[in-house]
Structure formats: structure tokens, C-alpha cells
């Protein structure tokens, strides 16, 4: 999340004044709506043409309704020439299809990214467009072009709105342990891969975790996924104080995990690392995560869920999340989000503090981490603990007493 001081004041004021807002009438509602984000819940561009395409001698499975298991079976039934044709004709559909082969998705997304970059460059050079529109096109082209660097593995890309992107570090198909980073507010294509402050972006968090996992267990095959696969709250808007976007994001996260079940072979369900508003998404998704993530090779049946810098998970206790997740929580003393009221009033707020003594999460140390975005900094207890939990090395986790 960016601009923490002002965001903190806005959120605290919103909670304290919720009764006033309830009676403020249409003008207040209109002001709130003006900064709301449009959630993405439908399949990507090209899906309608895909469904109507009968040139393969069979119906193509509808991306909106087909389960990842059925998708995996469909793609497995195709000849290499048919797969090539689908990738070239429908790169956005194939690239976002949970259950499709990983290499196929990587290849499709390179095509989709190149198409988006080239289209943005055309807009940037169009003298008929105003200066602001052209500048935004230049920025979009640059953001996309970075994702086309050699060796990058883009698992999903959707150019709609602010842009959604998911990237993989490591050999996901052969990994023994898989981790998924679920970021919070302001995560999107433009903030995915930040050079000035890398740990503010999902890509920087994932890189740091992957490096720490390799340091702790160099012989263990691991993979880390940076999942910016949902529309996050933007800036200081009211979306950060409600679960509206998380309600749409949760099924998308569940579908990602169901797709991983079909295309990977980890020894345990993927671990989830849920930062800030991402912990609201994880909390909303939690009850159905065991069904989505369980696989024949799963030896524990329990998904490790790490929440940090959390405004709450939409519940009053970890027990409300269901028995299929093990919640680990931390917040460093300098994280401003600790000053946000942990409550729910009407549709504002996200429930109890996961680091509180009565919540029921297992508390871990984040010593030496600073601020809201410092949890993946090298040398911190939080990064050490995230990697140890992701690797299943629970004996090496530094635990603490919960906050009171």
C-alpha cells in the first residue's frame, strides 16, 4: 500500500465516522463510488470467439465454467499442432487458463505480452491522442516489455484495466514446495516489478523469498509465484476498507490453486503469503482452499497461510477460516497498519487483528523488519520464517507471544 500516513487517517476516520457516513446520503455515496475499482471476474479477451470456434471438430471448453481438472484433460487430448494453433490464435485465453500445461501458458503469454507492448507503442506514437494518453501508453509499453526479458515465466497476463500479471520463479512443474505471494493494495502491472523499491512490488517479494528458500534448503526444488491475479484497491479509495474486491478475488485464488493441483507435483499444498489487503483475500478464500489445493501427493492436507501487515482477515478468529489452513501471523512494531482499528462496522473493516492473543493464529517474529513493506528484507526474521514455513521446516521458525 502506498502513502501510508494519509491512508491511515482516511481509514481510521472512516471507521470512527461510519454512523455519520451511513446517513450522509447520495453525495457521500457518489464520492466513494468515484474512486472504486472495477473488479475483473470474467474470462479474458478472446473467450467469446474461443467458445464459438468449432473448427477443431469439437466444442472448446468455456473458460468461464470449465474446471481446471477438465481443462487439463482437454489440453492433454490435443495434438501438438492443435496446441500451437490455439496458442497463436487465442494467446490470452490459453495464457490465463488454469489447468493448461505450464509451458503452454508461458508461451501464450509471451505472445500476449508482445501484442500488448506493440499496441501500446502504436498508441504512444499516435499524434491524434492527447499527451496524457500517449504518456500512459509509453508507460504501459515499458512495463510490458520488461516482462518479455529472457527467462521470465509469466503464468498469467490480462491487460484489462490496470493490468493483471502472475510470474513464476523456479521450475514449477518439478517443484517439491510451492509458495504463492498474494499482494495487497496498489498491486497491478505498473507496480509489479519496481526497480527503485523492489520489495514494494509482488515480483520483488517473490524474488526475495525464492532466494531465501534456496539459501536455507539448496537441495530442495522450490518455486515461488507472485500472484497479481485480482484487481486490488487503488491508493486511498474506500475499497481498502471493504471486502468487495476480496469477494471477487477469492474464487480466482481458489482457481489458481486448483490449476496448480493439475499441473504441479509438490509434496504439500502451496503455501500462501498474504500481505496487507491480500490477507483479506486469503481469509475470504480460506474455507474452500483445502478442496482447491489438495492433491494425491499431499501428505498434510493443511495449507500454510502466512499473513503480515494485515488489516484483518474478515473474521474474528482463525477457527472461522476452516480446518484446512494453518494461519501464521506477524506485524512489526513500525508497521503503520497496527494503528488501524481492527473491527467491522457495517461493511467497513476486516475483523479482528490476526496478531492478537485471541485470534488463534500462530505468531512468528518479524524482528528487524521495518514499516509496512519491509517484511521481505534480507536478514529479517520475517523473511527467514516465511521461507522456513514454505519449506515445511517448522522447527526453524522463530515464534513469539501474540499481541495483547
Image: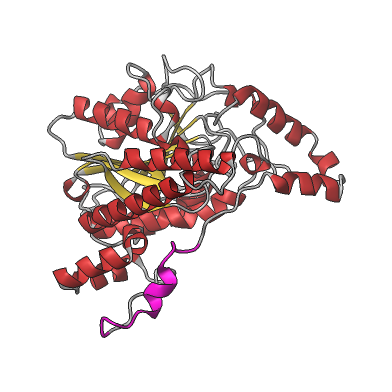
Of residues 263 and 326, the one drawn nearer to the viewer in this rendering: 263
SS majority, magenta? loop
Res. 305 in view? no
Of residues 190 and 349, the one drawn nearer to the viewer in this rendering: 190
Q: Residue at x 36, y 68 (%)?
A: 67
Residue 22 covered by magenta stretch: no
| Quarter of the rendering containing residue 103 | bottom left
Q: Which residues are drawn in magenta?
A: 42-57
| Quarter of the rendering containing residue 226 | top left
Q: Is residue 335 left or right of residue 8?
A: left
Q: Is residue 237 left or right of residue 121?
A: right
Q: How is the image coloured?
A: secondary structure
Please state the horizontal and vertical placement of residue 148, each as a whole percent of the image: 29, 43
Residue 43 covered by magenta stretch: yes
Of residues 45 and 219, the one drawn nearer to the viewer in this rendering: 45
Question: Does 42 sit above or below residue 403?
Answer: below
Question: Does 166 sit above or below residue 6?
Answer: below
In the displayed image of the protein, which residue is found farthest to the bottom?
Answer: 57
| Quarter of the rendering containing residue 316 | top right
Q: Residue at x 38, y 47 (%)?
A: 117
Please state the horizontal and vertical placement of residue 145, each as a whole percent of the image: 34, 41
Amino acid at each position: 500500500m502506498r502513502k501510508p500516513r494519509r491512508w491511515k487517517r482516511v481509514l481510521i476516520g472512516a471507521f470512527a465516522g461510519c454512523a455519520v457516513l451511513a446517513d450522509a446520503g447520495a453525495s457521500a455515496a457518489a464520492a466513494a463510488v468515484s474512486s472504486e475499482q472495477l473488479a475483473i471476474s470474467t474470462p479474458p479477451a478472446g473467450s467469446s470467439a474461443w467458445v464459438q470456434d468449432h473448427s477443431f471438430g469439437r466444442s472448446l471448453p468455456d473458460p468461464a465454467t470449465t474446471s481446471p481438472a477438465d481443462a487439463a484433460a482437454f489440453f492433454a487430448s490435443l495434438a501438438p499442432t492443435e496446441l500451437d494453433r490455439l496458442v497463436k490464435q487465442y494467446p490470452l485465453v490459453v495464457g490465463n487458463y488454469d489447468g493448461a500445461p505450464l509451458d503452454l501458458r508461458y508461451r501464450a503469454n509471451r505472445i500476449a505480452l508482445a501484442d500488448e507492448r506493440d499496441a501500446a507503442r502504436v498508441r504512444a506514437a499516435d499524434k491524434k491522442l492527447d499527451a496524457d494518453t500517449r504518456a500512459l501508453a509509453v508507460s504501459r509499453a515499458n512495463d510490458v516489455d520488461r516482462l518479455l526479458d529472457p527467462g521470465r515465466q509469466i503464468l498469467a497476463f490480462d491487460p484489462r484495466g490496470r493490468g493483471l500479471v502472475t510470474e513464476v520463479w523456479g521450475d514449477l512443474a518439478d517443484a517439491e514446495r510451492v509458495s504463492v505471494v498474494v499482494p495487497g493494495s496498489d498491486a497491478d502491472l505498473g507496480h509489479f516489478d519496481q526497480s527503485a523499491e523492489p520489495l514494494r512490488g509482488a515480483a520483488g517479494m517473490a524474488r526475495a523469498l525464492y532466494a531465501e528458500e534456496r539459501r536455507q534448503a539448496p537441495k530442495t526444488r522450490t518455486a515461488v509465484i507472485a500472484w497479481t491475479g485480482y484487481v486490488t484497491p487503488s491508493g486511498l479509495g474506500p475499497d481498502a476498507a471493504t471486502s468487495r474486491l476480496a469477494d471477487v478475488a477469492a474464487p480466482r485464488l481458489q482457481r489458481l490453486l486448483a490449476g496448480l493441483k493439475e499441473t504441479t507435483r509438490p509434496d504439500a499444498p502451496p503455501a500462501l503469503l498474504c500481505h496487507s489487503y491480500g490477507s483479506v483475500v486469503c481469509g475470504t478464500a480460506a474455507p474452500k482452499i483445502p478442496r482447491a489445493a489438495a492433491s494425491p501427493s499431499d501428505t498434510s492436507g493443511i495449507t500454510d497461510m502466512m499473513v503480515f501487515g494485515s488489516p484483518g482477515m474478515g473474521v474474528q478468529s482463525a477457527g472461522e477460516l476452516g480446518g484446512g489452513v494453518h494461519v501464521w501471523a506477524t506485524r512489526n512494531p513500525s508497521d503503520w497498519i497496527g494503528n488501524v482499528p481492527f473491527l467491522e462496522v457495517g461493511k467497513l473493516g476486516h475483523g479482528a487483528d490476526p496478531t492478537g492473543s485471541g485470534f488463534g493464529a500462530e505468531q512468528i517474529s518479524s524482528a528487524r523488519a521495518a514499516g509496512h513493506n519491509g517484511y521481505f528484507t534480507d536478514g529479517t526474521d520475517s523473511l527467514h520464517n516465511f521461507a522456513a514455513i514454505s519449506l515445511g521446516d517448522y522447527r526453524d521458525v522463530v515464534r513469539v507471544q501474540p499481541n495483547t
